[in-house]
Image (cartoon, rainbow, N blue to C red):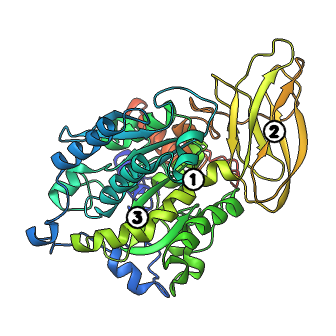
């Protein structure tokens, strides 16, 4: 029986609505619900993380710095230790609060051939412990430079950037989300599902972090959360949304970094919920749009998500103990940038000038880019392994060498000869010189490419129905190429 044009239009609209309804529902951010519906083995932990706590009273907030007091504390670090610190802003929150960063280095604000690390606190407004702990960290480094060997190592061999609060508005409102009630750890571009593809729809705090990562050449980083006691590492989600161990290309290195934090902690490694006090994010419970995975994919930055307090908003009297339990963990994690891994510079043989070449490790499907200023690279790697290190640059011949990475870092410079670059297929890069191209292209390689092709064909069909008077037409569906597994 022939179908009328209006009835066919109605059916196509129903199919379109059904297609969009099949997109993954907003998974909770790290420290929220388990979208897989399973919380076995971690039920008590998930309950602590599940939602905003409506019982955050004035009494509970007493003893925590307000946003204005936090700004005073940040600027006080800069005034007290101007020789090893710099205060700068990466943007503003929805309500206009400045997102202030403390940079600690023997040459703050200057470009050097040194690795950079960042700590971010208060991603969720109702998890304020990170703000207090990070101010303590900055003051401890200020007080102990040239007195403590670890403090001196960090100050003189790297650039440490500390953002005490990413979500000052959420803190003031005593809730997880920002002033627009958006979970900021759910607001980044995601590798598996197209979440917030358009940068104009992202929150100002999210955009500030993304621009910051593009401007700075971070080697590694960590964000501080509350509601559990564990060091979490990528991937945070899985391709099919199932709760499973889903390791990234640098899984071994991330497990090493997470263990550095956990084993340095007072009791994190003794966890009964998480073996060794560490966990793969997707195995714990999958999330999408998280900051951790985005840093690794688009910034070449090895980021951990650190849950540093069993209680999301503990009483202020507990803060000194939490600081002491986490102090060595934070120091050792930051110091691991210079204590291990492979570091060096890439030069052009004909000019002797540094070049921003790429560095890859054979057998690991990720790469990093050397800096444009000094051609320096800093690659996190798990010690105790042999690695083949490969340096390449368009217009130069690729070079490779093998190293044995033991407990100490390896220094390795490359001098590349001009000539044809290797015939290997080059990955697309974004402005950071990182893998996977721009956000939109990256997302179109996700698991729902078929769905978007289908929706696109429906839109074409609707257009034809309106523009043509013919009553029949055929849509040819082509089998899209399978996405490349990461």
Residue furthest to the left = 58
Q: Quadrant of residue 428?
A: top right
Residue with the mark numbered 1: 149
Q: Kindly indicate whether the residue at mark 2 contacts the one at mark 1 (C-beta within 8 angstroms).
A: no
Q: Nearer the viewer, mark 3 or mark 1?
A: 1
Residue neighbourhood size for the residue with mark 3, other residues' Cα within 10 Å, grouped as few (<14), some (14–19), many (≥20) = many
SS type, badge 3: loop
- Quarter the C terminus occupies: bottom right
Looking at the image, residue 300 lies above or below residue 250 = above
> Of the residues under marks 3 and 2, which one precedes in the sequence?
3
What is the distance, in whole Å, between disc 1 and disc 2 at their CAs? 25 Å
Looking at the image, residue 349 lies above or below residue 288 = above
Residue neighbourhood size for the residue with mark 1, other residues' Cα within 10 Å, grouped as few (<14), some (14–19), many (≥20) = few
> Of the residues under marks 1 and 2, which one precedes in the sequence?
1
The percent position of residue 207, horizontal first and vertical second, equals 38, 38
What numbered label is drawn on residue 71?
Answer: none
Residue with the mark numbered 3: 27
Looking at the image, residue 237 lies above or below residue 381 = below
Residue 451 appears in view: no
Q: Nearer the viewer, mark 1 or mark 2?
A: 1
Q: Nearer the viewer, residue 101 or 434?
A: 101
Q: What residue sits 90% from the left and 47% below the top?
A: 402
Residue with the mark numbered 2: 412
What is the distance, in whole Å, between disc 3 and disc 1 at their CAs? 43 Å
Q: Nearer the viewer, mark 3 or mark 2?
A: 2
Q: Quadrant of residue 326?
A: bottom left
Q: What residue sits 60% from the left and 65% below the top?
A: 260
């Amino acid at each position: 029986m022939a179908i009328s044009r209006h009835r066919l239009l109605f059916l196509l609209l129903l199919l379109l609505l059904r297609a969009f309804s099949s997109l993954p529902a907003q998974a909770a951010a790290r420290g929220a619900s388990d979208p897989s519906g399973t919380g076995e083995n971690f039920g008590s932990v998930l309950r602590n993380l599940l939602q905003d706590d409506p019982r955050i009273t004035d009494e509970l907030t007493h003893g925590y710095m307000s946003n204005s007091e936090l700004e005073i504390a940040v600027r006080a670090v800069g005034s007290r230790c101007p020789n090893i610190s710099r205060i700068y802003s990466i943007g503003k929150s929805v309500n206009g609060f400045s997102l202030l960063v403390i940079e600690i280095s023997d040459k703050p604000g200057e470009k050097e051939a040194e690795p950079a690390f960042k700590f971010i606190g208060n991603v969720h407004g109702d998890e304020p412990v990170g703000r207090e702990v990070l101010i303590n960290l900055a003051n401890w480094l200020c007080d102990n430079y040239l007195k403590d060997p670890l403090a001196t190592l960090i100050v003189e061999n790297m650039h440490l950037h500390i953002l005490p609060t990413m979500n000052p508005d959420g803190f003031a409102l005593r809730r997880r989300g920002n002033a627009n009630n958006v979970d900021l750890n759910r607001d980044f571009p995601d590798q598996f599902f197209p979440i917030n593809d358009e940068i104009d729809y992202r929150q100002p705090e999210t955009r500030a972090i993304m621009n910051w990562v593009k401007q700075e050449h971070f080697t590694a980083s960590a964000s501080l959360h509350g509601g559990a006691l564990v060091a979490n590492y990528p991937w945070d989600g899985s391709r099919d949304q199932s709760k499973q161990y889903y390791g990234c290309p640098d899984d071994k290195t991330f497990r090493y970094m997470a263990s550095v934090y956990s084993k340095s902690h007072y009791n994190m490694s003794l966890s009964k919920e998480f073996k060794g006090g560490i966990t793969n994010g997707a195995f714990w419970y999958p999330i999408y749009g998280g900051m951790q995975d985005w840093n690794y994919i688009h910034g070449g930055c090895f980021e951990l998500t650190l849950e540093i307090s069993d209680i999301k908003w503990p009483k202020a009297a507990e803060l000194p103990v939490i600081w002491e339990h986490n102090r060595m963990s934070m120091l050792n994690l930051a110091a691991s940038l210079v204590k291990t891994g492979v570091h060096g510079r890439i030069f052009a043989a004909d000019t002797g000038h540094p070049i921003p070449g790429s560095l890859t490790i054979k057998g690991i499907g990720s790469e990093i880019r050397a800096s444009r200023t000094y051609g320096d690279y800093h690659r996190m790697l798990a010690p105790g392994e042999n690695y083949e290190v490969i340096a390449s640059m368009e217009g130069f011949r690729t070079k490779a060498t093998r190293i044995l990475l033991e407990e100490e870092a390896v220094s390795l410079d490359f001098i590349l000869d001009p000539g044809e670059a290797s015939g290997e297929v080059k990955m697309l890069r974004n402005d950071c010189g990182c893998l996977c191209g721009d956000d939109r292209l990256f997302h179109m390689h996700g698991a729902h490419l078929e769905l978007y092709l289908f929706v696109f064909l429906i839109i074409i069909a609707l257009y034809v129905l309106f523009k043509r008077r013919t009553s029949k037409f055929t849509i040819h569906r082509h089998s899209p190429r399978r996405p490349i597994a990461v």
